Image (spheres, rainbow, N blue to C red):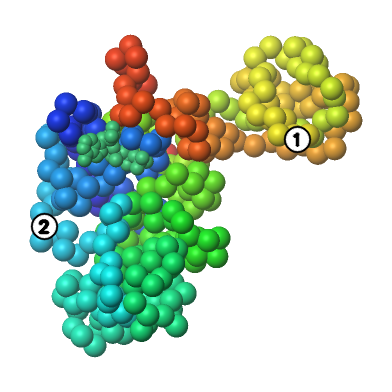
Amino acid sequence: MALEARDVAYSYGDRVALDGVDVEVAPGVLTGLLGPNGAGKTTLMRIMLGVLTPDRGEVLLRGVPVDSEARQHWGYMPQERGLYPGMQVGDQVVYFGRLHGLTRADAHARARQLLSELGLEDRWEQRTDKLSGGLQQRLQLATALVHQPEVIVLDEPFAGLDPVAVAELSDSLRERARSGCTVLFSSHQLDLVQNLCEDIVMVNAGRIVLRGPLASLRAASTGVQLRLNVHAPDRRWLAHFPGAAVVSEEADEVRIAIPRGTDPLSVLDGARAAGRVDDFGLDLPSLSQLFLESVGPAKAPGTPDAPDGSARSDGSSRSDTTARGSR
Ligand SMILES: Nc1ncnc2c1ncn2[C@@H]1O[C@H](COP(=O)(O)OP(=O)(O)OP(=O)(O)O)[C@@H](O)[C@H]1O
């Protein structure tokens, strides 16, 4: 059974951060928590971890309200990193293992194993504050995982990691999910989430705007896209296909959303009549495109922050889109 947040609401003074959020994180799959800056992700994680008490709603694991005793067995990495400067790397991991009730010998063995898994095997005696930012991040993860938690909640665990570390951490989280752990993590790296996560939860301005199995959400979205490398100076040929629209153009590649009822191959023929086509393919919309559709271009990662915690100017929010396909 899953980790759940039910109808969770939270405000910092008069700033509404979460406005009645329902989330379900299933064991055995990786779930990515997405949303623009200020959407409410960290607040939701803090509530799940018991750092904040919700104004309304509750957090449950296997249908039972979660208390501090249950959370003692969780692994978590908060946005505010908590390493002890001056402590040695190995001792830091052992210390957290002991805090979670491991014997000294077990904590040592687990620390060795994890530091090796996270590429820190040579750093046991180094001071934590002498590590680079990325290595501190890996160490932070080791402290979160040392007691082999069944529930893992990580705020931006991939931020600041190099590609090798991203691949190693991805494998490590995938493996933990496969072995039955419940894993929720937040990220702004949409390509990574698309490759890694089976399920996503997307939050915007304190509300869920999209959630469910990513494959179902992509399939249920705007339909297929035709990817073309076409040497045609303009796009007038597209006017023959009502409803077909360019969704992105990069260098020679153009992506065209194909409306339902239109044969993508007829659009391909149209492109070939207009110019040379070097390459083509059919794709589902990417997670980045789903993000832009759900949240709006002004708030996509990498764009300037939108008004903090803003609701839409008309006071409404986009409707919650969910997909619960069969697994
Ligand atoms: N301590 C605080 N006091 C007042 N407002 C806060 C506080 N922490 C967060 N907020 C506000 O609550 C809203 C949600 O913030 P939160 O940190 O949960 O967003 P987030 O999705 O994690 O953002 P980011 O991607 O930028 O980390 C924002 O409007 C933010 O400004």
Mark sitting on residue 251: 1
Mark 2–mark 1 distance (CA, rounded to whole Å): 53 Å
Which residue is located at x 44 percent, y 53 percent?
159
Quick check: 129 above or below 9? below
Tell me which corner region of the image, top left, top right, bottom left or bottom right, holds residue 226: top right
- CA neighbours of label 1 inside 10 A, class few (<14), some (14 to 19), many (20+): few
Q: Amino acid at mark 2?
A: Ser
Tell me the residue that label 2 is attached to: 68
Q: Where is 239 relative to 203, above or below? A: above
Q: Quadrant of ligand 1?
A: top left
Secondary structure under the numbered disc 1 in the rendered image: loop
Q: Does the Cβ of the disc 2 residue fall within 8 Å of ligand 1?
A: no
The residue sitting at 37% across, 80% down in the picture is 126
Can you give x and y, in whole percent of width and height, for residue 41 in the image? 31, 41
Can I make out residue 306 in this image?
A: yes
Amino acid under label 1? Ala
Q: Nearer the viewer, residue 27 or 286?
A: 286
Residue extending farthest to the bottom is 105
